[in-house]
């Protein structure tokens, strides 16, 4: 007959060993999880560092491209403004020349403004296209008709209005007026472009 106290002691020892094995297994599993988690975190850090190292130059190039596009946008808008002004002046030139070809009296308003400026000159000579002589005569102020000599010049373009006096030469032609407007607008655009 087996010894019951020895058997109980063996069973208690076996149970203690089983508990010890379970405890070691639990500790081993916890250590495995801790190692796995530490390895995962380290891998994430390394991956993040590697991604930053690889993406850093790409992000810098993207930032440089964005900055370049931003400055290019302002430059293109400035160029477009200049093109719009040139187009508007070209259209104005065509419209005015067409108006002058249809109605020689259209030069009258321009001539009156110029004659007001020339009022202090004792005498002057006006060069115009022959088709505009009558319009210029009609524009002359009543008191100045004797001091003004009109010289028709077939070589002149429609809208030409050149005044010569002792003070000098004044080109009040339609094209000259448009050029003056063009220079003023170009200066204004250059000034606004410099302030941006």
Image: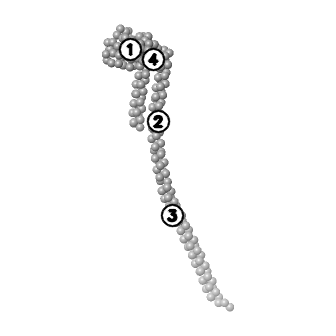
How far apart are the alpha carbons under marks 2 and 4? 35 Å
Pointer 2: what residue?
A: 77
Question: Would residue 62 be seen by someone viewing this image from the given angle?
Answer: yes
How far apart are the alpha carbons under marks 2 and 3? 51 Å
Whole-percent x, y for residue 24 in the image:
57, 75
Whether label 1 touches label 3, CB < 8 Å: no
Whether label 2 touches label 4, CB < 8 Å: no
Position of residue 69 relative to residue 23, above or below, is above
The quadrant the C terminus occupies is top left
Marks 1 and 3, the one that precedes in the sequence: 3
Which class describes the residues within 10 Å of circle 2: few (<14), some (14-19), or many (20+)?
Answer: few
Whole-percent x, y for residue 102 in the image:
50, 15
Pointer 4: what residue?
A: 158
Whole-percent x, y for residue 23 in the image:
57, 75
Residue 171: image quadrant is top left
In the image, taking residue 30 as reference, residue 57 lies left or right, namely left
Pointer 1: what residue?
A: 126
* Residue in the foreground of this view, choosing between 143 and 149: 149
- Residue that appears at 44% across and 13% down: 130
Residue 20: image quadrant is bottom right
Position of residue 163 relative to residue 51, above or below, is above
- Residue that appears at 46% across and 14% down: 104
Position of residue 174 relative to residue 84, above or below, is above
Marks 3 and 4, the one that precedes in the sequence: 3
Mark 4: secondary structure: loop
């Amino acid at each position: 007959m087996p010894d019951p106290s020895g058997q109980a002691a063996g069973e208690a020892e076996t149970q203690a060993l089983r508990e010890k094995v379970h405890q070691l297994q639990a500790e081993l599993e916890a250590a495995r999880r801790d190692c796995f988690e530490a390895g995962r975190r380290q891998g994430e850090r390394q991956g993040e560092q590697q991604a930053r190292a690889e993406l850093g130059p790409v992000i810098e190039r993207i930032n440089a491209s964005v900055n370049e596009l931003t400055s290019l946008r302002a430059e293109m808008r400035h160029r477009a403004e200049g093109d719009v002004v040139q187009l508007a002046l070209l259209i104005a030139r065509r419209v005015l020349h067409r108006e002058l070809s249809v109605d020689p009296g259209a030069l009258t308003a321009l001539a009156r403004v110029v004659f007001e400026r020339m009022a202090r000159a004792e005498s002057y000579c006006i060069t115009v296209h022959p088709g505009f002589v009558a319009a210029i005569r009609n524009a002359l102020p009543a008191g100045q008709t004797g001091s003004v000599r009109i010289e028709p010049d077939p070589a002149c373009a429609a809208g030409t209005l050149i005044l010569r006096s002792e003070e000098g030469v004044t080109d009040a032609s339609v094209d000259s007026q448009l050029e003056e407007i063009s220079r003023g607008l170009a200066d204004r655009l250059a000034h606004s472009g410099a302030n941006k």
